[in-house]
Amino acid sequence: MKQSDPTGNSMRETLLLVDDEDAVRRVLYLKLSREGYRCEEADGTEQALHVLETVPVALVLLDIKMPGKSGIELLPEIKEAYPDTAVIMATAVNDVDIAVQCLKRGADDYTCKPFNLDDVSLAVQRALHKRRLQLELREYQQFLEEKVEEQMVETKRLFLGAIEALVSALEAKDKYTGGHSRRVTEIAVAVGKELDLSAQDMEDLRWGSLLHDLGKIAVDQAIQNKPGSLTPEEYEHIMTHPQIGARIVRPVVNGRIADIIEHHHDHYDGTGLHRIVAGNAIPLGARILAVADAFDAMTSDRPYRPAMSRKEALDEIKRSTTTQFDPVVANALLRVMSR
Ligand SMILES: [Fe+2]
């Protein structure tokens, strides 16, 4: 909080008095210091800019007519570099047009020369009061924006937590896929690190991996757990889960996460079901997820076959590189798994 003297003036705000005449500055200095303001002086543009650079100034009392650069020229420079600094222009009585020009250029007020010191004092009080209100308003706006942002983060966290619980519940129903999404996430994150992904891409990859099979909620359980091989129709039915999963999460997560989920079964050479994108048109997160997902699926028991060994799974990934998997991503997984 700012301190106030008994008359209510701020004790801490600094005023900058700019006038080429020493006597004028002296009179202003005595009057305004006595009223509790801290006053700095400048005899021209150059000195004024120097003070502004070194001291936080709340208000500039700026003479218009000075040798060299005039106050009118200096005004926009001050407003541009120090938008929170109030400026009162000092004009000659017969210069009303100039005063209006100054207001248009961003001056907060003007006062006429020769000075009536009480008028000057009132103009300073008014301009500082307006400035304080503006600063408080902006602070409040920032506070509100931060609150809204916090609330959004919290809502998203709660939602994603709930979805995560749903994924666990889905997997718990099925003895073959228990823990699959978590394991896939760990592998995908390790590959993402190996490929030096940005923090944002890593976060998207983590959520995409965790939620990638959410669409299986709409898949017929009997088909999913069918021992033996699937008919083409059954396979097509199961392969609707990337689109369904993406559709479920799209309203609440960013589009990149939904895209990772939607494309996680796309083949690098474009031969995957349902999708026609190929190569690098498949989001990088989805290409990483595809390899991580395949590795975990192959090394887990399935109703139609027992788990492969780690080496067999890695050999299979090597074989499917450039057809099903992006070679850069597949090689990153092979490096991660060889450690
Ligand atoms: Fe999947």
Image: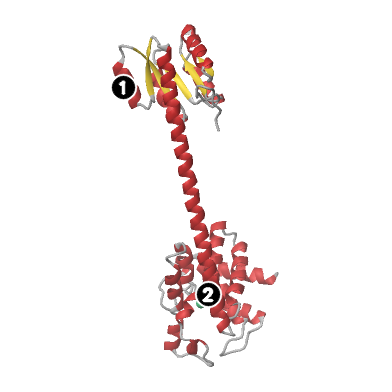
- Residue 242 picture location, percent across and down: 46, 75
- Residue 93 picture location, percent across and down: 33, 12
Q: Nearer the viewer, residue 308 or 149?
A: 149
| Residue drawn at the location 42% of the way across and 25% of the way down | 127
Residue 74 in view in this figure:
no
Kindly tell me whether mark 1's CB lies below 8 Å from ligand 1: no
Query: Does 91 appear above or below 309?
Result: above
Residue 302 in view in this figure:
yes
Q: Residue furthest left?
A: 97
- Quadrant including the C terminus: bottom right
**Residue beneath disc 2:** 166
Residue type (three-letter) at the residue carrying disc 1: Val
The disc placed on residue 146 is none
- Residue 58 picture location, percent across and down: 49, 26
Work out how far the residue at label 1 is from the one at label 2, CA to CA, in angstroms.
66 Å
| Residue drawn at the location 69% of the way across and 71% of the way down | 338
- Quadrant including the N terminus: top right
Residue type (three-letter) at the residue carrying disc 2: Leu
Label 1 neighbour load within 10 Å: few <14, some 14-19, many 20+: few
Q: Nearer the viewer, residue 266 or 15?
A: 15
| Residue drawn at the location 50% of the way across and 66% of the way down | 159
Query: Does 93 appear above or below 125?
Result: above
| Residue drawn at the location 47% of the way across and 35% of the way down | 135
Q: Nearer the viewer, residue 112 or 317?
A: 112
Query: Does 82 appear above or below 71?
Result: below
Kindly tell me whether mark 2's CB lies below 8 Å from ligand 1: no
Compared across the picture, whether 167 is left or right of 75 comes to right
The disc placed on residue 100 is 1
Q: Residue furthest front?
A: 6
What secondary structure is marked by label 2?
Answer: helix
Label 2 neighbour load within 10 Å: few <14, some 14-19, many 20+: some
What secondary structure is marked by label 1?
Answer: helix
